[in-house]
Amino acid sequence: MLVFQPSRYLEQIMKINPVQRQGLISLASTIGLTAIGFLSTMYFAHVVGPSILGAYFLFVAYFSVFNLIGDGGFGGAAVKRISEGEDQNAYFTAFALLRVVLMIVSVGFLLSIQPYLDNFASSGLLLWLILALVVSTFSNVASRGVYGRGMVGINQISGLIDTLIRIGVQVAAIVLGYGVAGLAGGFVAGILASGLFNFRFLDLSLAPFSRSHVASLFAFSIWTFLSSSGYLVFSYADTIMIGYFMTEADIGIYRVALQLTSIATFATLALHTTLYPKISYWGKQNDLSLVEGALTRAFTYSLLLAVPIVAGGWVLGERLLYFFYGEAFATGAGALAILLLVQVAHVFMSLQTMCLNALDRPQDSFRVTAIAVAANIVLNILLIPIYGVVGASVATLITMALNATLANRALSRNIAVRIEPRATGNIVLAALIMVAVVVAFPFVIPFSNVFSVLGAVGLGGLIYILVLLRIDRSIHDELKELTQKLGIPWPEGL
């Protein structure tokens, strides 16, 4: 009789290469976060509708803006300096103090512009926003310390805890009738739980620091802050502008479509999180061949998921929106088709800008992002009033592709940036075969309910995996080896 023994399974995991092991933890955590996030959003969409959901998305957008001001780029700078292994406690202490000071500045700025946020303040979300900013300071200090020390798995688990607590509180609050305030309260609860978990594993301590430590953080943070501001524009400028030119219901429809496409990049997010401290270390040791190999393989494994998701989304997107979120959200199908392409551009933009920052070139990361940000703002202003959420999607696609192209040019000055043409071609071929099967599916089983759509998704995914493993031996062998290291039997037919 086969008995599951956690200690033996953990021992198997610890034998895996550290990068692969941390990547698996990151990927598993990201899959968990994505699945839970999807299910909760589906529930909220059906229960409260697009308007309340849109108001909550606007709250998250404002939080992200003011939290960025409160971070000032020092979070990324602290991870970079701590990961380099020198004066870790001093850098951590300097960062903690700076983070508290900037949080006070951020809240002060928020209060000063309160008269311009009448609609937002009248919804009762302003106090929740201030509380979220205060709690996030503690959580951010703990998480940056843990991440800088290379404990990527702990940091990822804390993200899972954040999501579980947040959604648990939100669901309970919605059931009790608290509406958008309940959604905001759950958001704060998740941040607090995540911070407490990270703090439990934090092995850094407060220590004296000098002006040189602050200067070193500042030298890196200014560029990180500016680059993060650019990423924030990509993430939330469209949300805020849709809210300005249109309605909160339109925000809800747009953000739901965007969330549905985000599954295409959770492999990218896992690799981004895992590789940053590793590339930072390799760059410090001037071992650029390891950086080039890791980036190339990261492209392949990101596209491994992104390409079939995009292809399948074009075929099933409208049906997925209709059955998963409700009839009101199906109007976002046009935006969804464009946002799927955004996620492919995001693969290259995210991994390349991560490399620029990890290789201590935040100036270049900022320069390429600044150009794309300027274009994004202009395009959103021009396109949203005319084309609505579709215009916002087009603006995001154009500027994301621009950012990826410019980042490639900047990074290529130091390392060879390349994709694996054979593996990428095999991924595209497998995805095309999958699409043919999915297109034929409704001729056998019509898309009359959610289960028939899920059946098409499941069959398409199975066909894609089987075809890819057959035509690409490199991916086949690597996945087989990794699976066997985990102690999971590999199917004989594969």
Image (spheres, grey):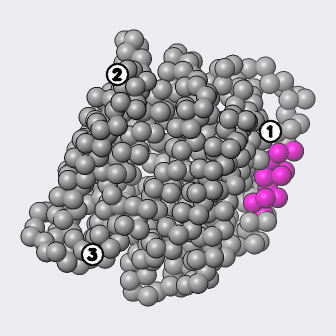
Regarding mark 1 in the picture, which secondary structure is present there?
A: helix
Regarding mark 3 in the picture, which secondary structure is present there?
A: helix
Q: Where is residue 119 in the image (x, y as percent from the top left)?
A: 43, 24
Q: Where is residue 376 in the image (x, y as percent from the top left)?
A: 61, 52
Q: Quadrant of the C terminus?
A: bottom right
Residue that numbered label 2 is attached to = 124
The reply to whether residue 265 is in sight is yes
Whether residue 227 sits left or right of residue 383 in the image: it is: left
Q: Where does the magenta region start and end?
A: 426-436
Residue 315 marker: 1
Q: Is residue 133 above or below residue 12?
A: above
Whether residue 486 sits left or right of residue 380 in the image: it is: left
Quadrant of residue 147 within the rendered picture = bottom left
Give how far apart the Cα atoms at labels 2 and 3 are.
40 Å
Q: Position of residue 107 (x, y in %)?
A: 27, 42
Magenta stretch, main secondary structure class: helix
Give the mark nearest the N terminus, 1 or 2: 2
**What residue occupies the far bottom of the structure in this picture?**
286
Whether residue 224 sits left or right of residue 394 in the image: it is: left
Residue at position x 50%, y 57% from top?
Answer: 230
Amino acid marked by disc 1: Val
Residue that numbered label 3 is attached to = 216
